[in-house]
Image (cartoon, coloured by chain):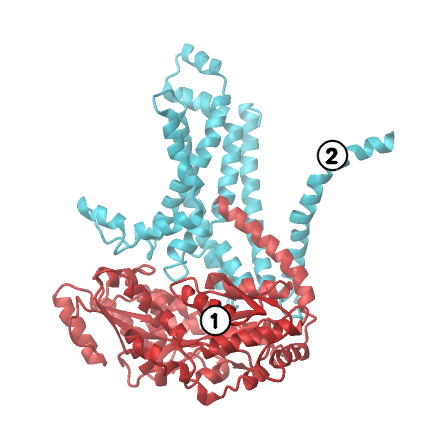
Chain colours: A cyan, B red
Amino acid sequence: MSLRAKLTPWGFMAPYLILFAVFVIAPIVLGLWMSLHNWDQFLPDKPYVGLDNYGALFDGDGATSAPFWRAMRATAIFTVLSVPLLVALPLAVAVLLNRRFRGRNLFRAMFFAPYVLGVAVVGVLWRLLLDPNIGAVNYLLGLVGLPDDTAWTTATPWAWVSLVGMTVWWTLGFNAIIYLAGLQDIPRERYEAAELEGAGRWQQFRYVTVPGLRPVLFFVITVTILASANMFGQAYLVTNGAPGQETRTAIMYIAEEGFRNFRLGSAAAMSYVLSLFLMALSALVFFFFRDRDRVGGEAL
Amino acid sequence: MRVTRRSLLASGALTGAGLMLGACGSTTTRDQLVAQGRAAAGQGIGYDGPPVELEFWNGFTGGDGPFMRDLVDRFNREHDNVRVRMNVILWVDYYQKTTSAVASGTGPDVGVMQMDQIGTAAAHRVIVPLDEVADEMGLREQDFTPAVWEASVVGGSRYGIPLDVHPLGMYVNRTLVPEGTPTDRRQFLDALARLKDEGVAGAWMSPFLFTGSLLFQTLLYQFGGELYTEGAERAAWDSEAGVEALSFMVDLVRRGYSIRDVGQDADNLAFKNGENAFFFSGCWSINDFGATPELKWSSEVMPTIGDRPAVWANSHNFVLMRQAGGDEDRLRAAATFIDFISRHSATWAEAGMVPARTAERRSPVVRKIEPLRPFVEELPDVRFPPTVAGISEVRTNSLDPAVNVAVLLKEDPRQALRDAAKRANALLESNRQKYAGVVA
């Protein structure tokens, strides 16, 4: 009985544990192993190089360090620019869509619609729209008397504006839906109580809605940071990293290094450095929310 | 971004697969590969064994695909015991997919590779030496256009049977330039000056590989420069010739002969829209322009901007993929297929490619395709990329971004080329260590 009792939970967890072990634990361990070798999966020799692959990332004269840190910088820029927008705008949209009005479902569908498109469709679409010389965006800007020669895809900072803008357009609906679900979970009585206390619209939002959304907010911020830090398709298709390699993100460079240059060892080392950054960032977000928790008394 | 995560998972899975497969792939020795090539050749090309089905993978996703499919259909009609199935994959994914597939024993039998990818594939033991197959096909250097035959030899072994040559050339929008074709620097600049007076930026300089980086390589050769030193040991584009070549492109932008900040493929679209007069592209654009309604255009020989004629070119080569089981029937059937297509490659010219075999190139079918004529005329001056393992990725990570920042007027040409050469040399050195001793 006692043995059975001990085994039962493992039995229930087994299906997931197997998947977890095969697709998460094993790649993590293998990746670490690979990063210690000069690893080309199609060559018979995969010489052990110790920490050389990591060292090369911090050696200014190495073949990988300058492009890697430039790619990390690109990822950082994109994350810093896109996360605040992708956290705030969908919240505003969700609050609006949570009110009762005619055609509400139509608007909900409209905001969510771009999200169902694949990155290839979105990328090619915006590349054509944003083309500096023959794109529709500059043409329309010209019609209303605004500058029509902005290099949306070939010069910074405009390339960042384009990449962030199209990403917001594309994925705003997803975060909005999450917020919407969260909003519907906030009990109506709290708003009624707040109203009785004489709270205005803004005060209701500030003291009822935001605290009520805290667990959802935590989820949205974490997921959005990770998603933005993993940006690949947009830059790959719209700017192709241009100008130079300024908009080539870390994931783009890692994929190129591993699968086109056949340097999986070096690519694995880069992945670990990127992962460390992301883990630190996630921990920061977690602690930020935990501390606020103690003060606010709202359960996560 | 949802797709990003999915593609990450996919690449993780690929990595895992690659690991396991890499283990099996590593056991293939060079002798086994040579033996497969020998088996494919046999005592003369031909196959009369039991029925086999062959997989043929290529990257002909554009207007060229249907023409290759026609050739395959014709082969299937004329051979009862061999059935070839053609599978088309985007070139950007082609090389990593075929390499993984061959390593896992699920690869195709026959493939097509661009010249600068053959060295890498040979090093990865993906493709089989074809010296015996070429002998049995009765092919000799003089049967081919100059340089293309020797270019698919890596480490003393032949790995490719050249199918075509596709050089860069100049397309002229005949609405903007009704008459005359510039053939040298002065005429070209005069034509651009006239166009500028009419308010047209006549030659859009692309900052991307297609076709800015291809144009840069062409000009580099024309000014007497080289991409790499002998044997591709070091980058050589940071020479005076390189600086002159890149400065010429940059000056076109500065003088308003090209628009600034040309986007990907915008030079091509603008040519079709009648906004760009001179477009430098390969012969592969012929069918695209031919199918564009109301576009008046002609293809011309690349003008000589530097002090000698020279033009960038690449070549599609047939390759025989390593067989997991070393099945002799399949190898012999595959060689038969390659031989057939090669002997009938005149049809391939309709896809907008110059057949590599001299006899095929001179056939009436090819002569009839008027827009292809300038590209045929360029053949004595074509320059191919080197076939050293990993060479194409070196360029992608060094020279291409340098051309990009210079044409976008973000960096001085000399400095950009010098920095790129430094990075390329580091990559070449690490490739030398990695591939040392792999290609015999």
Q: Residue furthest top?
A: A196
- SS at circle 2: helix
Question: The disc labelled 1 sits on which kind of residue?
Answer: Ser
Q: Nearer the viewer, residue A1 or B296?
A: B296
Spatial CA span between label 1 and label 2: 51 Å
**Left or right: B297 as drawn, with respect to A189:** left
Question: Would you name the residue on which mark 2 appears?
Answer: A12
**Residue at x 48%, y 63% (from the top left corner):** A66
Q: Nearer the viewer, residue A218 or B109?
A: B109
Badge 2: residue crowd in 10 Å (few <14, some 14–19, many ≥20): few
Question: Would you name the residue on which mark 1 appears?
Answer: B392
Q: Chain of mark 2?
A: A
Q: Chain of mark 1?
A: B
The answer to whether residue B54 is visible is yes
**Residue at x 23%, y 54% (from the top left corner):** A149
Badge 1: residue crowd in 10 Å (few <14, some 14–19, many ≥20): some
